[in-house]
Amino acid sequence: MDNAKHDTVLDAGSVKARLAKVYAEALLAGAIRQNAVDATGDELSHFVSDVLDAAPEVESFLASPVVGKKAKAAALDAALPGRTSDLIRGLFTVLARNSRLNLLRGIAASYRLLLDDRAGRIRVKVTSAMDLSDTQRAALSSTLTDILKQQPILAVRVDPDLLGGMIVQIGDRVIDTSVRTRLQSLRTLLLESPK
């Protein structure tokens, strides 16, 4: 499935993002009490990848305002026994009761960010004109570690339209050293200069 449509699932200022973060923080607090922080994160991530990504109709069903709370709860009860922890089952129950099952993907993303923060990691999106070699990835990771004082987790994708260079996105900060952007800037400068 194309994850591009889910890149902005957690726009920092959105109401859904704030709600997802509240639920993720509550889930993390419960996971800490049960000493199941990583297992809970894995379980939630697997649900998103194995169920929501694999069967978009399930996500549509869970998010649909037309489907009643009882029908959603019954479907989850039938699908989850023996397959999920009490924490995750409890989360699903609370979300169903409050008509918030549409937040599952956002909660999973928020939970992952909370875990990264606890571990001193930061997610970095890198778009480059061509695939980065292992040496280039290591050099970029080392440079970012020195600058950010956190361990970067690189998500690299290739966009040949950049022509050269790369775009590095860290949260809401973007560092664009692509040839495409430099050429666009030069074009703008030349078109705006007095004749």
Image: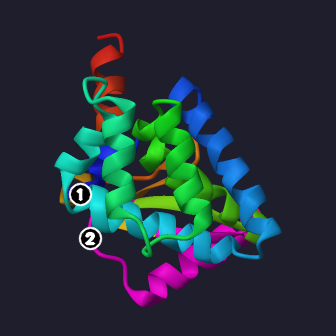
- Residue 158 placed where, x, y %? 27, 65
**For the residue carrying disc 2, how many other residues have a C-alpha within 10 Å: few (<14), some (14-19), or many (20+)?**
some
Q: Is residue 130 above or below residue 161?
A: below
Circle 2 residue: 130
Which quadrant of the structure image shows residue 49? bottom left
Q: How many marks?
A: 2
Q: CA distance from mark 2 to mark 1?
A: 9 Å
Count neighbours of disc 1 (C-alpha within 10 A) and say few if under 14, some if 14 to 19, many if 20 or more: some
Lower sequence index among marks 2 and 1: 2
Whether 136 is among the magenta residues is: yes
Q: Is residue 49 left or right of residue 43?
A: left
Q: Is residue 30 above or below residue 60?
A: below
Q: Is residue 31 magenta?
A: no
Name the spot of residue 25 as percent of width and height, x first. 71, 49
Residue 126 visible within the image: yes
Q: Which residues are drawn in magenta?
A: 127-154
Q: Looking at numbered disc 1 in the image, what kind of residue is underneath it?
A: Leu
Q: Nearer the viewer, mark 2 or mark 1?
A: 2
**What kind of residue is marked 2?**
Met
Residue labelled with disc 1: 163
The answer to whether 23 is drawn above or below residue 145 in the figure is above
Q: Secondary structure at mark 1?
A: loop
The residue most toward the right is 33
**Residue sitting at 70 percent across and 75 percent down?**
36
| Nearer to us in this view, 30 or 115 | 30
Q: Residue at x 59, y 27 (%)?
A: 13
- In terms of secondary structure, where does tag 2 sit? loop
Q: Nearer the viewer, residue 72 or 137?
A: 72
